[in-house]
Image (cartoon, rainbow, N blue to C red):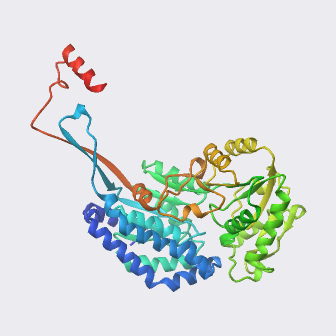
Amino acid sequence: MDITEIVKAQRKFFESGKTLSVAFRKEALISLEKAIKNHEQEVISALKEDLGKSLQESYMCEYGLALSELTYMKKHFKGYARRKRATSPLTNFPSASYLYKVPYGNVLIMSPWNYPFLLTIDPLIDAIAAGNTAVVKPSAYSPKTGAVMQKIISEAFDPEYVAMILGGRQENQTLLDEKFDFIFFTGSQAVGKEVMSKASKHLTPVSLELGGKSPCIIDEDANIKLAAKRVVFGKYLNCGQTCVAPDYIVCHKNIKNAFIEAVKEEIKKQYGDDPLNNDAYGKIINDKHFNRIVGLIDEKKLVYGGKSDSSKLKIEPTVIDNVSYDDAIMQQEIFGPLMPILSFDNLDELLDNINKGPHPLAFYYFSRNSAKAKAAVARCRFGGGCINDTIVHLATPYMPFGGVGESGMGNYHGKFGFDTFSHTKSIVNKKQWLDLNMRYQPYTDSKVKILKMFLK
């Protein structure tokens, strides 16, 4: 079937009402889990081919997290789908009020290349649990993983229920020209704007999981060695190609040099003396992004790393010091293994400057002072973040993950993902044994007095 026929078939299937059954959804989640486990080694191998991911990184950041979401959702989604009682005001007496979580219908899920398995399967799990049909479109930049996921989807589902579309821009455009009931997109801000523009023609609601320049502040009283260890992990994970990676580091001027030395030591500990030949260190997705990232390296400000191998698409974990906000590396999201370091001496001014820019997807603050940390987190506008760590806030089904402003809209994971793919119906069941007359014409002064009593 072509794209238009798939969308029509899914709409017809949804209208049959089969996906409304909690039992049907449970079986769908079980089928997906079985298919994923049947192709475990293929997924791991594909991630290695596409992005150079090691076995541990693939399990830790993709395969394992996807199965964790599946396990969580199987256990909890029945409760999320259950009708909830709501309070009825006196003006509706006598009545009973209820909230129903219902699926949107036919949804489109568009996923990126940097975590191609996790960021495809995670929202699909939430969409299925919420009772939708789904068309899934992964990025063309991670073809090996896309091919394995198509096997998994085809094995688990009929295309009239869940279908995967492979391809590039042409397929993306064709899909966005179709009418869906909800669109979930993960990717760049530029493409996110196009998705939102296309969705507006049909007044289709969207969730946009985007990115941006996420700051990481190392304050004067931070645990420098621990901060360096955790920043190096978060910055260079997946070769820097992580939407919530600390994009740039801002150190208090009094501890900047000590932090840089600690970072150098940590890079050696975690990646060895020759990262370009470390098989557990990933690679850049393609030549286009490799050349873009290499072009951001300022040799005059380079203090560590900087070497690259175009034949392997690898760039060393790199540290660049004395960076200014006007430098080229600060004009775009890096999305690569380059760590620009800036300095500050006034935290209030720094937070003001961060708030003046586009709202980042993540925010990280290192300090031993819990009061200062809480104040910094409360003051800045961002999607989510950590105090004294990086990245780990997204690895839980108990908190929502998503951006704000330029870094996106909507969120998911666990119950929040179920809610994202659901519409809440409000229903009042009005009793028939009493019918208060005050709302009906003719209106009188006595009715107005009674109404005022009810509405106080």
Q: Residue at x 25, y 62 (%)?
A: 17
Q: Residue at x 44, y 51 (%)?
A: 205
> Viewer-proximal residue, 134 or 131?
131
Left-right relation of 114 to 420? right
* Quadrant into which the N terminus falls: bottom left
Count of numbered badges drawn on the protein:
0
Q: Position of residue 184 (x, y in %)?
A: 47, 59
Left-right relation of 448 to 77? left
Q: Residue at x 83, y 57 (%)?
A: 256
Residue 108 makes an appearance in the image: yes
* Quadrant into which the C terminus falls: top left
Q: Quadrant of residue 13?
A: bottom left
238 up-or-down from 376: above or below: below
| The residue positioned farthest toward the left in the image shown | 433
> Viewer-proximal residue, 179 or 334?
334
Q: Quadrant of residue 271?
A: bottom right
Q: Position of residue 78 (x, y in %)?
A: 31, 63
Left-right relation of 160 to 402? left
Q: Position of residue 338 (x, y in %)?
A: 76, 65
Q: Residue at x 32, y 66 (%)?
A: 9
| The residue positioned farthest toward the top in the image shown | 445
Q: Position of residue 98 (x, y in %)?
A: 26, 47
> Viewer-proximal residue, 41 or 347?
347
Left-right relation of 146 to 378? left
